[in-house]
Every structure is written in structure tokens, then in C-alpha cells.
Amino acid sequence: MRATTTNHVDLLVLSILRSGPAHGYAIVDALRERSEGAFDLAEGTVYPALYRLERQGLVSSAWEEVARRRRVYRLTKKGTTALASERDRWQRYVRAMQAVVA
Amino acid sequence: MIDPVLEELAARLDELGVRGKWRRRVLAEARDHLEELDAEDEADAAGRFGDVGEVARLVAAGLATSRTRSAAFFVFGALALTGLVYTASLALVGPAGGWTDVTSGHAGAFGPLLAIALVVLPQVAFVSGCLALLRSVRIRRMPVAEAELSLVRRRCTVALASGAATLLALGLMAANEAGALAAWWVVGTIAACVLLVIPLAFASVGVVRAGAPAALPGGGEGDVFDDLAPVFSNATVRRLDLPAHPWRFAALTAASVGLAGCAAGWYAEGDPGSGLVRGGFEAIALLACFALFGRVLGLRRSE
């Protein structure tokens, strides 16, 4: 169960970063906005997910000074590839579920 | 509002062994996040940020996994260097003057012990290092539970200890052969042994650091049958039911290694008797190591 949840958070975070670089707060904000409030996660937990993705080389990060000093995350080339493959897998899963449930 | 949350987060990170640059980074990003919430007049900023204990636990678990994995790679690299020097040293004994009797020099009665150490220890280091690497490759994606990480660190520790003991044995052998073998071999071997202590020491520090952050509690450590699942899932091998009978696995491996040692000894010495002695020794050494390190290295389950 933990593995599934972790994978979902990773996929969501990578999907948000596809739109462009963002810092932790902006990622959580975008997640809540795009899901129309459905994904209202404990905001601090986005950071362990970002660190995990960074260690896997799927995102990179650096401190940037725009109005204030923030750690900004961006998708790497490896992250873009991983996102595409995860998204395909997710869409296949959703189609299969719909075929059975609907 | 912000400071008490950050103080609690800092305390939790300390408790869970997250220190140095990761501690600073987590706290800086948490401060930034809480200030954003504060700027938006969010009344329950602390609540929105979530349980700081959970955040600290996830950070520590991720760090424990990645450090353990890196440590295993580093240990394997350091051991590969050791193996290279060991092989080169032994290969150059011939040009340096040739093998002498194991009881010659100052070693006396310790000579045979030194010879046994030089045969057995590198093999223990090699097997432990490979097992640590194998498991660390398997666990590359997720934060992993403590039991499994602890197994990788134990494998690393045995590999490093055996590697260091190999260097010591090789250095002692070189010192013992001073006068009997060429000076360039003796000096070169001792110098290489001393230099190789550096990567082994760095690798040891990596293993110790990997154990500092708290991993996710619980979990099962698994064993070599999980590591080599593709091999053991083969229909013929599965019929032997080796995971349930690890000593059967040890006996089969010892028989294979013994036969290989026998063939190698026969080929090298041109005498089947020498081959039999070498093969028998290898098989007995393997069984002894299985008994000694079986549980530590996860060759058989402890439960």
C-alpha cells in the first residue's frame, strides 16, 4: 500500500513539474488547484518525495533568488522519460478499471 | 508560529539521525514553506504543513536508503581495487623469484595459517561484496525498511573486514618473503597494501554514515534466494526446494566449488592428488564460511 501511495505522489509531482520549474510550496498549490482540492496532502510531505525523486535523478534542484531565496525543482531528461512511461502505465490502468467498473 | 514548528522539526531530525547539510536543507525549505503560508494569512499554517514527525521520518528513511545503497557501491569499488592488487601481486610472484615453502621465512608455523587466510579471506570479501551490491541494485527505487538495509550494511561490513584482513595477510606475506623474493615485489606489494587502506577506510566511513539516519521500521531482510530470485525460480532448481533447505544449497555449492578447485589444482600442478587436496579444502572452507557467516550475510534466514 505504501509503495502505491509513494508512486502516486511521485507521478503527481513529476506531472506538476512538467509545466515548468517550481518550488515546494508552488508544487503543492498547483496540485491542489489542478485536482480541484481533491489532493489536499499534508504539505510538508512533498519534500521527502522531492528528495527521493532528486536522488533518482528524475528532478534537479537549486537555490534561486527571485523575490526571496527558494529551492526550485525542475524535471530532468530522465524525469521526462520516466514521467512519459509512468503516465502511459497509469492511463492503461485507468482504461482497464473503467472497462471493468463502468 | 513558524519557529516552534521548525524547532520541533529540528528536534525530530536530530532524533532520527539527520544531520549536516540535509538537516539544514530540510529546515530551510520548511521555513520557506511556512513563511509562504504565513504570508497568505493561513491561520493553520502548522496544520497545513502536516505532522513534522512524519516529514522527518520520511526524510530519514530516504536518506538511510540512498546512503546504504551508495555505501554498497563504494565498498564494492574499494574491494575491486583490493582484488586487482591481490591478483597482480600473486601473478607477479613467479617473475619475482617464485613461490617458496609456506613455512619459510619468519612465519614458521604461522605460514600455513597465512596461506589459508590468503586463499579464504579474498573469497569471503568477494562474495559479501557481490551480495551487498546485488541487494543494493534491487532496492534502488523505494525507501526501504530497516531490516533490509541492515542486511546490506552487514554484508558491507563483512566484505570490508575480509578485504582489510586480506591486505594484512598479503602485507605480512610480502614482509615474510623479503630476501626470498625480489625487492621490487616486496616493496611494491607492501606499499600497495598500505595505500589500499585509504579507499577501504573511506568505504567504512560510508557504511557507518549509512546507519545513522533511521530507516522505516520493520520489514523482512530476505536472503540470498530473494537476491537471486531469477535463478531459483527456474523449474529444475525450484524442485530442489533450496530456500527451505539452505544447507542443501551450501552442500551443492561446496560440491561445485570443490570440483572446480579439483580441476584447477590438477591442471596447475599436473597431479590429481594436488587437485583433490585443493578441491577438498575449497569445499570445506565454503561450508565453514556458510556456518560462520550464513545468517550475517543473509545466506539463510534468521527466523
Image (cartoon, helix red, strand yellow):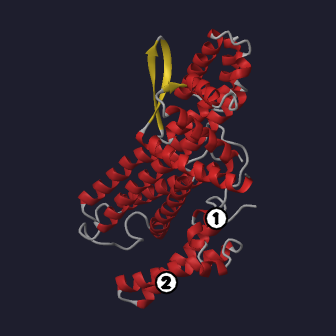
Q: Secondary structure at mark 2?
A: helix
Q: Secondary structure at mark 1?
A: loop
Q: Nearer the viewer, residue B295 or B274?
A: B295
For badge 2, the amino acid type reads Leu
What label sits on residue A60 in the rendered view?
Answer: none
Residue B263 x, y percent position in the rendering: 42, 85
Q: Is residue A18 left or right of residue B236?
A: left
| Quadrant hosting residue A49 | top right
Residue A57 x, y percent position in the rendering: 46, 40
Whether residue B208 is visible, yes or no, is no
Chain at numbered mark 2: B
Q: Is residue B205 above or below residue B136?
A: above
Q: Is residue B179 left or right of residue B201?
A: left
Task: Report the residue at 31% width, 60% height from top.
Answer: B178
Residue B180 x, y percent position in the rendering: 29, 66
Whether residue A71 is visible, yes or no, is yes
What label sits on residue B294 in the rendered view?
Answer: 1
Task: Report the residue at 44% width, 19% height from top.
Answer: A64
Q: Nearer the viewer, residue A58 or B232?
A: A58
What label sits on residue B259 in the rendered view?
Answer: 2
